[in-house]
Amino acid sequence: MTGEQLSRDIIETLRSQGHEAYWAGGCVRDQLLGVAAKDYDVATDAPPEDLLRYFPDAIRVGVQFGVVLVRREGVDVEVATFRTDHDYRDGRRPESVTFTRSPEEDVRRRDFTINGVLYDPIEGKHLDFVEGRADLEAKRVRTIGDPEKRFEEDKLRMLRGVRFAARLGFEIEGATFEAIRKHAPEIGQVSAERIRDEISRILTEGGAKRGFELLDESGLLKAILPEISALKGVEQSPQHHPEGDVWTHTLIMLGKLEDPTVTLALGTLLHDVGKPATFQRAPDRMRFNGHVEVGMKMAEAICGRVRYSGEVTEQVVALVANHMRFMYVAEMRQSTLKKFLRMPRFDEHLELHRLDCLGSHGKLELYETARAKLTELPEEELRPPRLLTGDDLITAGYRPGPRFQEILGDVEDAQLEGRLTTPEEALAYVENRYEPSSSQTREP
């Protein structure tokens, strides 16, 4: 079953009970733009108690606001009762709602005209009370009614407006954009989790470069990610970065993202975040000594501030930590190279390096070298079974302690470089270099 099929079934059920029901929101917008809808929402005049009676297994996701979720065969469709909203006191959600039988009243409390068109899939008719189709044709993002009021009601709508404009390649209508600029400092009233989700969507849904340009122009970037705003005007050496400052470099890279994971997109955004704090103008060129280490700490702090998971944060910090290591890939020892290539999700490290090159000097020799090495080395050479374990060392008379990790790491390096191939060779290697009684390296 698809979302379209389930939503049609829901509408037919509601119609059979004498109710109005329509597709609403993004699915109608996408249909009018000729693209496949990701999700289907239904709006109806049926009150919440009737929705729960018609769909007894519905999930009560926001029944006080007239919203339930109907699930069939792993497919979800949100069904909402027509309503008008009362005061928004927290810049997030209305204090209360009044259910209505009027589809127009329901539409006029929504955010943007392009999301305000309803569609009857049974009769094939649109209901457009807010000139949403005209704005879609004009490629324009405009609030429904007074933009000041819309953004005072829900501050997150400012980020949503930027996201729609970036993803669709639309312009933000003048009064709407001015209202965003006016209210941008208030975005901090929105929870970090909601901001995080919009940042992720801007980065991954398409149009990330334009999205961050709009965030910057509107003042939202400085309010939510001041560390990224600080990249502007930070000069770089022309021989390595002919494109310009760190902000320009980052924007070019964002513009080259193609259906990225959120971790790759965040790694792209944050890979040089440590440069402003480490900028030095040397006689020969601009230098950023320690920008990787500083950037790692900043990336971790940013991800924590906007509530990314530990797993996401760990990978983003790893991307920042390792993005400069590619310059040494042609001269790495075999053990170092193999450990580098077998890092978790190395494909993201490799892609970040490619984007880094394309966003600056354009030279891909080291990228091609790393990719070739990854292809040439079979899995059993990258991740061979251990020749020795801690238990083997204990059996051989070594006392457990912090040096175990050093000893086993030494053995693994020798194994990865082809100097050791059997457990017997590995044990002899250890006994020749480390005293069993103290686990100390023997003096030469």
Image: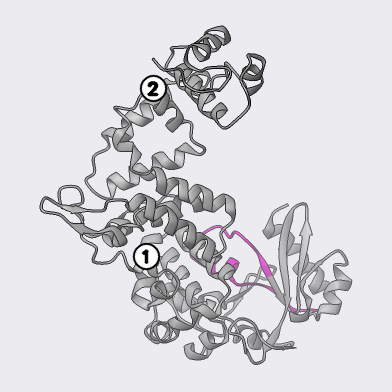
Image location (x, y in percent) of residue 18: 82, 79
The residue nearer to you, when weighing 265 against 39, is 265
The disc, 1 or 2, on the residue closer to the chain's N-terminal end is: 1
* Label total for image: 2
Residue position for label 1: 228
Q: Check residue 334 in the rendering and tell me which mark sits there, or answer none.
A: 2
The residue nearer to you, when weighing 7 against 189, is 189
The residue nearer to you, when weighing 7 against 61, is 61
What is the quadrant of residue 233 in the picture? Answer: bottom left
SS label for mark 1 = helix
Quote the CA–CA distance across marks 1 and 2. 37 Å
Image location (x, y in percent) of residue 260: 47, 50
- The stretch of residues the image draws in magenta is 19-41
**Figure quadrant of the C terminus:** top left
Image location (x, y in percent) of residue 426: 53, 12
Q: Residue at x 58, y 60 (%)?
A: 37
Is 2 located above or below residue 202 in the figure? above
The answer to whether residue 21 shows anywhere in this view is no
SS label for mark 2 = helix
What is the quadrant of residue 43 in the picture? Answer: bottom right
Is 182 located above or below residue 201 in the figure? below
Q: Residue at x 54, y 23 (%)?
A: 408
Is 69 located above or below residue 413 in the figure? below
Amino acid on which the number 1 mark rests in the picture: Ile
Image location (x, y in percent) of residue 315: 50, 47
Amino acid on which the number 2 mark rests in the picture: Gln
Q: Nearer the viewer, mark 1 or mark 2?
A: 2
The residue nearer to you, when weighing 60 against 88, is 88
Q: Is residue 324 in the magenta section? A: no
Residue furthest to the left in view is 283
